Image (cartoon, rainbow, N blue to C red):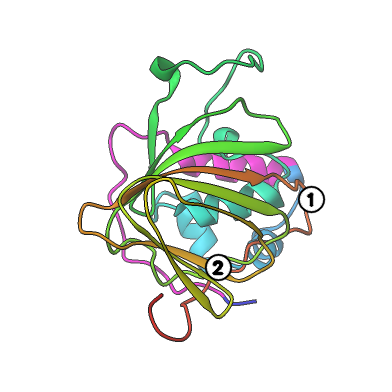
Amino acid sequence: MSVPADEPAEEPPADLPAVAPQLRALRRRAGTTLEAAARAAGLSPAHLSRLETGQRQPSLPMLLALARVYSTTVSELLGETVADRDAVVRAAAMEPTGAGGWTYWQAGAPGRGMQALRVHVPYGAQGDIVRVHPGEEWLYVLTGRLRLRLGDTAHLLGPGDSAHFDSLTPHRLAAADQGGTELLFVHTLLQSPTAALCLGPGTGGTP
């Protein structure tokens, strides 16, 4: 399992949820140590400690990894609460959230077997992060072009193109155009404390 290098310190955006206290509370609720949680999420204990104290802001892949470790959802990690699991999510209720340079909107109710997001991937953000984790992913390009690497194969997707793949295949996403790309993104939530997301620099050439 690759462990991501520490990222430069970021100032928490004023309009985003306070993630740090929630991360700490969920780890304590799970009854796990900092070292064990960090190992399961593919992070160093020092990096997880910085996330819990607000010295670092987690990227979206880190949030997904920690959600699996704590058997919860990204929404709960961000401190978002939903009164019930309504089948309909109105556009006005989709509040933007930032993580690792990406912006995403919850497009489905929490607590389901899948999580649906609308994601904006800016040019140059997280393009070297390789993701490997149990489950499946489906994405659909709305605007811009997306570079998708699946294993050793590179793909360039345009508006209207989609991809559906096993998440155990090493994969990475990057916007191909300066204006970024916008996606519909669905992934399965395998809420097992042993499930982990492996992160690390990509190998080989840029897709």
What residue range appears in magenta? 3-29
Asked whether 40 or 30 is in front, the reply is 40
The residue labelled by disc 1 is 192
Asked whether 155 or 22 is in front, the reply is 155
Residue 133: x and y in percent read 67, 62
Look at the picture and state if 204 lies above or below 154.
Answer: below
Q: Residue 199's image quarter?
A: bottom right
Q: Residue 177's image quarter?
A: bottom left
How many marks on residues?
Answer: 2
> Is residue 85 within the magenta segment?
no
Position of 103 compared to 163: left or right?
Answer: left
State the residue at coordinates (61%, 25%).
Answer: 109
Amino acid on which disc 2 is placed: His
The residue labelled by disc 2 is 171
Position of 101 compared to 177: left or right?
Answer: right
State the residue at coordinates (71%, 63%).
Answer: 36
